[in-house]
Amino acid sequence: MDNNTITTLVLAILASNGFFALVQFLITRWDTRKNLKGTLRKLEKDGLRTQLLLMILLRPQEKREILTLGERYFSKPPKGLDGNWYMTDMFKKWLKEEGHSNPDWFNKE
């Protein structure tokens, strides 16, 4: 084999490995971003749940703030966080005690 053939083979092997390393890097980066977004969404939901719970228990007269938090917590994604059953019961109880009807965005049965 001549030098050109050997050089071509070596470059092809190096380029192939480099290409697959780049693809692996891009896939790993995409997975990391996806996992990070899920973690941030969970943390936002947990924080908002805590804030809503505290507002309902400690400041039930703050109707506008509770309704704003409730809308963000209970609405369906992408606008909301699709809240859980525990806060649904608490929120229904608060609505009843305060004499409110169910808002349009509160579609929990």
Image: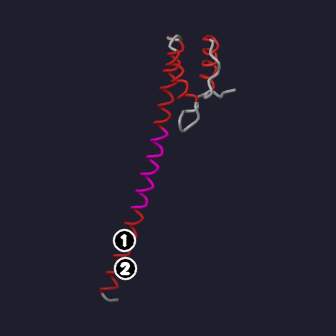
Name the residue at 35% across, 71% down: 14
Would you say residue 80 sits in the magenta stretch? no
Residue placed most toward the observer, 103 or 2: 103
Q: Is residue 93 left or right of residue 40?
A: right
Determine whether 90 is above or below 29 in the image.
above
Q: Quadrant of residue 76?
A: top right
Name the residue at 44% across, 46% down: 33
Quadrant of the frame with the C terminus: top right
Q: Is residue 45 left or right of residue 98?
A: left
Badge 1 element: helix
Residue 34 at what x, y percent from top left?
A: 48, 46
Determine whether 6 is above or below 76 in the image.
below
Res 15 label: 1
Which label's residue is closer to the chain start, 1 or 2?
2
Q: How many marks?
A: 2
Quadrant of the frame with the N terminus: bottom left
Res 9 label: 2
